[in-house]
Image (cartoon, helix red, strand yellow):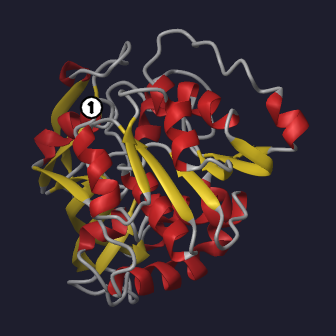
Amino acid sequence: MRVRAIALKRRPNGLPETEDFDVCEVDAPPPEAGEIQVRNVCMSVDPYMRGRMYDRKSYVPPFQIGEVLSGGSIGEVLASAHPDFKEGDFVSSSYGWREGFPAPATQVERLGKIQAPPSAYLGALGMPGMTAYVGLLEIGALQDGESVFVSGAAGAVGSVAGQIAKIRGCSVIGSAGTDDKARLLTEELGFDYGFNYKEGSIVQHLRQAAPKGLDVYFDNVGSDHLQAALMCMRPNGRIPLCGAISTYNDAAPRPGPNNLSMAIGLGLTLRGFIVSNFMHRYANFRSDMEKWVNNGQIKTKETILGGIESAPDAFIGLFTGVNVGKMIVSL
């Protein structure tokens, strides 16, 4: 059987373009002993993938020209040659960017009885949700009732981080790139204050929303957001460094915040993290998040594009503000 997939045609220079990707066909043969054959039903595109398109060393190897890309996907088992899997099982894997695949059963996770739509396991119940969970509760050491600022708050990670903070009784501020997204934060997701960072001063917004300062800043953006947050932190505040999406397409490094010295006198903790280093928290995350999603404490937001051919546009849309919540490609 042949299936369609997306390969990297050339390395992007700045903001990716559709011409950087190639729709191709690859073999998806029946499973051999110990394998399963899977039809993907949806796949994820994520900002971190942009870093893998550079030919440089990072915490994950770079994508290679001509190779099919990889990323999170949820699929349904079509055929199984492994006793632990049967036809119709839903599985999570890193075999995204393709319509289907055979793989050793050891390389996928069987989801068991799923508690939400399959796409939710790429968002709130998947890697973005766990990133928010670990970043806020472990790296951010969040305490009940604190003051929290989340940048990129209408995105896949930020929208969940803010809602977790609300569950913990915190006062939550979020930034987003449009007025509509800022309203969504307060009107649908329960944030106490949402603002369009393109309108007015970020520092002024933060001082208006949190006159006594911030205990935790969950950083998805970097750059001007990090500089502004440093101006507004309370003593012993914590800054989980989750992402810096404002810089991912820069051809050359931009100047960093010029006020990092404030972290010294305030005793701030700034700590970067990679969610895959915290898999020992997965069982706790899965239990808590399924409960929160099912009882409505966490509302999942998705932007869905259809068809494998739309995957490049979905990915590019992450950097142009197209998505609200998790960007999903249905297959």
Q: Eyeballing the image, is 192 above or below 313?
A: below
Could you say where residue 13 lies in the image, as x and y percent from the top left? Answer: 37, 12
Please give the name of the residue rendered at 33% of the width and 19% of the height, measured from the top-left corner. 15
In-front residue for pair 92/267:
267
Quadrant, the C terminus = bottom left
From this viewpoint, which residue is outermost toward the top? 252
Q: Is residue 249 left or right of residue 88?
A: right
State the SS at label 1.
helix
Q: Is residue 147 left or right of residue 301?
A: right
Count of numbered marks: 1
Please give the name of the residue rendered at 31% of the width and 37% of the height, measured from the top-left corner. 318
Q: Eyeballing the image, is 313 above or below 328?
A: above
Residue 266 is drawn in which quadrant?
top right
Please give the name of the residue rendered at 57% of the width and 67% of the height, measured from the top-left corner. 170
Residue 131 is drawn in which quadrant?
bottom right
Residue 259 seen anywhere in this rendered image of the structure: yes
Could you say where residue 300 lies in the image, as x and y percent from the top left? Answer: 30, 67
In-front residue for pair 274/272:
272
Could you say where residue 250 lies in the image, as x and y percent from the top left? Answer: 47, 15
Amino acid beneath label 1: Ile
In-front residue for pair 177/250:
177
Crowding near the residue tagged with mark 1, few <14, some 14–19, many ≥20 C-alpha atoms within 10 Å: some
Q: Eyeballing the image, is 85 above or below 61?
A: below
> Can you identify the residue that label 1 sits on?
316
Could you say where residue 111 lies in the image, as x and y percent from the top left? Answer: 38, 81
Residue 258 is drawn in which quadrant?
top right
In-front residue for pair 221/146:
146
Please give the name of the residue rendered at 36% of the width and 27% of the height, measured from the top-left corner. 198
Quadrant, the N terminus = bottom left
Residue 323 seen anywhere in this rendered image of the structure: no
